[in-house]
């Protein structure tokens, strides 16, 4: 049963306890991960920051499109958890690359996501990756479905939610 918005976790630190942070996108303990920072609920959106490293590029100076999609998938997943109260997995995802995303080694890229609709446990979510100048570089929409009951229960036990 979903908890009210005020009872739901407010950010990554409340979702992933120490020792359970191996996620490729958000896990602080994953040495090769993306290490998305500051994942948090902000009103009816979730927000985070990506600080690209040199190994994140495809063409020289450009963020790899697969990593852009990974970051957006993570934001939609956190939107499902933090906004809709549902532990879920992505069933379908559409990504639109609107502009090349430079790898600004000294800057950060802002990520924003949200829930467009939540019904019968299925979540229609969206996410955007903003360029350093504020324009949208990549955006996505997706359908997220609840985790299988045994997986969700393991997550709740591990994460204490």
Image (cartoon, helix red, strand yellow):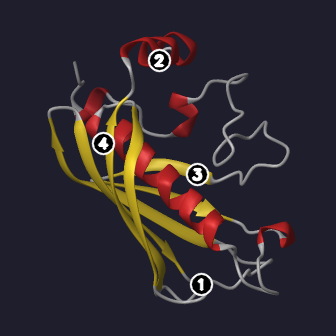
Q: Is residue 94 above or below residue 18?
A: below
Query: Which disc number belongs to residue 109?
Result: none
The mark nearer the N terminus, 4 or 3, is 3
Q: Name the image quarter holding residue 93.
A: bottom left
The percent coordinates of residue 34 (x first, y second) are 72, 54
Q: Which of the image's four quarters has the C terminus? A: top left
Mark 4 lies on residue: 83
Q: Disc 3 to disc 2, how far (Cα)?
A: 26 Å
The mark nearer the N terminus, 2 or 1, is 1
Task: Please indicate whether residue 47 sits to the left or right of residue 34 in the image.
Answer: left
Determine the secondary structure under disc 4. helix
Q: Residue at x 41, y 45 (%)?
A: 90
Determine the secondary structure under disc 2. helix
Circles 4 and 3, Cβ within 8 Å, touching? The answer is no
Mark 4 vs mark 3, foreground winner is 4
Mark 3 lies on residue: 38
Dot 2: within a 10 Å radius of its alpha carbon, few (fewer than 14), some, or many (20 or more) residues? few
The percent coordinates of residue 94 (x first, y second) are 39, 65
Determine the secondary structure under disc 1. loop
Q: Residue at x 72, y 33 (%)?
A: 22
Mark 2 vs mark 4, foreground winner is 2
Q: Disc 1 to disc 3, how far (Cα)?
A: 17 Å
Task: Please indicate whether residue 30 sits to the left or right of residue 40 in the image.
Answer: right
Mark 1 lies on residue: 132
């Amino acid at each position: 049963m979903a908890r009210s918005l005020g009872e739901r976790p407010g950010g990554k630190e409340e979702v992933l306890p120490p020792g359970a942070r191996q996620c490729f996108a958000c896990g602080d303990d994953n040495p090769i991960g993306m290490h998305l920072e500051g994942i948090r609920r902000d009103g009816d959106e979730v927000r985070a920051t990506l600080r690209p490293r040199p190994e994140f590029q495809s063409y020289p100076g450009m963020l790899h499109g697969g990593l852009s999609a990974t970051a957006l998938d993570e934001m939609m997943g956190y939107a499902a958890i933090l906004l809709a109260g549902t532990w879920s997995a992505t069933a379908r995802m559409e990504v639109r690359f609107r502009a090349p995303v430079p790898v600004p080694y000294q800057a950060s890229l802002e990520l924003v996501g949200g829930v467009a609709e939540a019904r019968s446990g299925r979540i229609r979510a969206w996410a955007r990756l903003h360029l350093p100048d504020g324009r949208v570089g990549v955006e996505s929409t997706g359908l997220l479905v609840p985790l299988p009951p045994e997986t969700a229960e393991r997550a709740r036990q591990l994460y204490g939610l």
